[in-house]
Image (cartoon, rainbow, N blue to C red):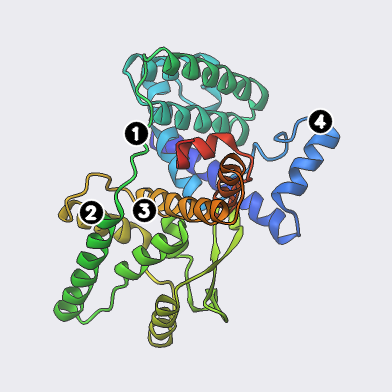
Amino acid sequence: MVSMKSELHDRLWNAFQRWHALREAGATKRDLKLRGIREFQDPHRITRPLIFSGNTLRTYEKVLRDFVAFAQREHGATRLEDIGKKAFRAFMDRGIAQGLAVETLNLRRSALAKFGSAVTRQTDSFAALSEKYGWKIRQLAKLGRLPGPTRATPGRQILERAIAILRDWDARHFARTGERRAYHLAARIQMETACRSISVTTRLTGECLREGNTLVATAKGGKELRFTLSADLHRTLRLWFAHYPGPLAGQPGYRSAYARAVEAAGGRVRGTHGARRRSIRDFYASRYRQAVGSGVAPDDAAHEAAGEALERLGHSRNRRDHRAAYLGR
């Protein structure tokens, strides 16, 4: 079993490295999708065997280690190549029977599709099964037979208290250990930009700060997003990086401290993605009020504000699924 898990890790890592080699050669995800359309009439044909970020690699590997253990235990698999569609269906059906949340089931099917494309070269069959279970999950969710994602959004007052708590904890950490810590700054950046936690921690350095209170953040897939920070936060970050170069913070430590701070502040939404949703909803409301105040019709103002919000998140402005997930509309 150890050898199967080790081999799984190696093959997933190779999929991650293949993307890095393509990117260093000048390729982009868009280029690969256009090539897939031209050569196979399928935009995802070339990208399916690739893994585009370290976060995705870690998340998928965790799911697939459980899948490999399940296939060995329930189906007697001794090699990764022994794991086929039967194990895929059984693993998904068991999750559905257990009443796993829609978000968890969708993560499973996405990871299994990547297993077929990047690990065992069963690209077409596993991709087709993933689409089939996506439809099945949507139907069960509509019938109320599966719990949907909560996507709860914390209140701004809760998060402001949590940031104050993190600031106090960071100061106490320095007094106790002599080591500086910037978890409260990472939380402030999330609140002002709606960035993911990785973009405000391990990917954030002094080089990300530009003139005009601008911050250039590295988002999912290496995409660069530009934000205008408050003058106070931008100045504070410049001073921080002048004394402490390198990444602003470690992501795991920040996420753990953030969760504890929200709980201490009386909140229940402990994940850092809650700050992302709070920030983008506030941004949407601000843009909507500005548009309506300038004479734009309410429906048009809502459409335009939603598009701006999605682009701020790093998504296409016409993605209805993300609009529903983040804005509830």
Mark 2 or mark 4: which comes first in sequence? 4
Alpha-carbon span between mark 2 and mark 3: 10 Å
Mark 2 falls on what kind of element?
helix
Quadrant assignment, res 95: top left
Mark 1 falls on what kind of element?
loop
- In percent of width and height, residue 190 lies at 41, 60
Examine the rendering and report whether any part of residue 70 can be seen.
yes
> Mark 2, mark 4: which one is toward the viewer?
2
Give, as a three-letter code, the residue at label 4.
Answer: Phe
Q: Nearer the viewer, residue 66 or 143?
A: 143
Alpha-carbon span between mark 2 and mark 4: 48 Å
Residue at x-position 44% and y-position 46% = 58
Mark 3 falls on what kind of element?
helix
Alpha-carbon span between mark 3 and mark 4: 40 Å
Mark 4 falls on what kind of element?
helix
Mark 1 or mark 3: which comes first in sequence? 1
Residue that carries the numbered disc 4 in the rendered image: 40
Mark 4 or mark 1: which comes first in sequence? 4
